[in-house]
Amino acid sequence: MAVYANLTIDQGSDFTSTITVEDSSGIPYDLTGHSARGKIKKSYTSSTSFPFTVNITNPADGEIDISLSSITTSQMKAGRYVYDIEIEETVTSYVTRVVEGQVEITPGVT
């Protein structure tokens, strides 16, 4: 079910993006009764991670907002990272990865 999508984030800036989770037919997946989470790491085995703030904003339409504050992005060195976003069905605790990919942190001057 996971979709591969790369992100570009400006170091030292706030970041927000909306993800629409869809089923295999392209129909928005109903996220009612789910929670969501996500992290960025320098590599899959890194012990240091940067968690996204994740909110399911429109469950019926499968919409998830992910964000990072400027404080968090300023702590990240410029370069490539990996990330993923997972949903968890709250009753059964069944976890599904819905988005994954690479993140490019572009360096800032200010």
Image (tube, rainbow, N blue to C red):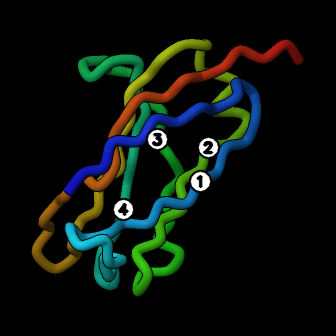
Q: Mark 2 or mark 1: which comes first in sequence?
A: 1
> Percent position (x, y) of residue 69?
68, 42
Marks 3,1: beta carbons within 8 A: no
Q: Mark 3 or mark 1: which comes first in sequence?
A: 1
- Give the residue pinned by disc 1: 17
> Percent position (x, y) of residue 44?
27, 23
Q: Mark 4 or mark 1: which comes first in sequence?
A: 1
- Give the residue pinned by disc 4: 36
- Give the residue pinned by disc 2: 68
How many angstroms separate mark 4 from mark 2 (CA)?
15 Å
10 Å crowding of disc 3: few (<14), some (14-19), many (20+): some
Amino acid type, mark 3: Pro
Amino acid type, mark 4: Ala
How many angstroms separate mark 3 from mark 1 (CA)?
14 Å
Residue 50 lies left or right of residue 35; in this view the side is: right
> Percent position (x, y) of residue 59?
42, 81
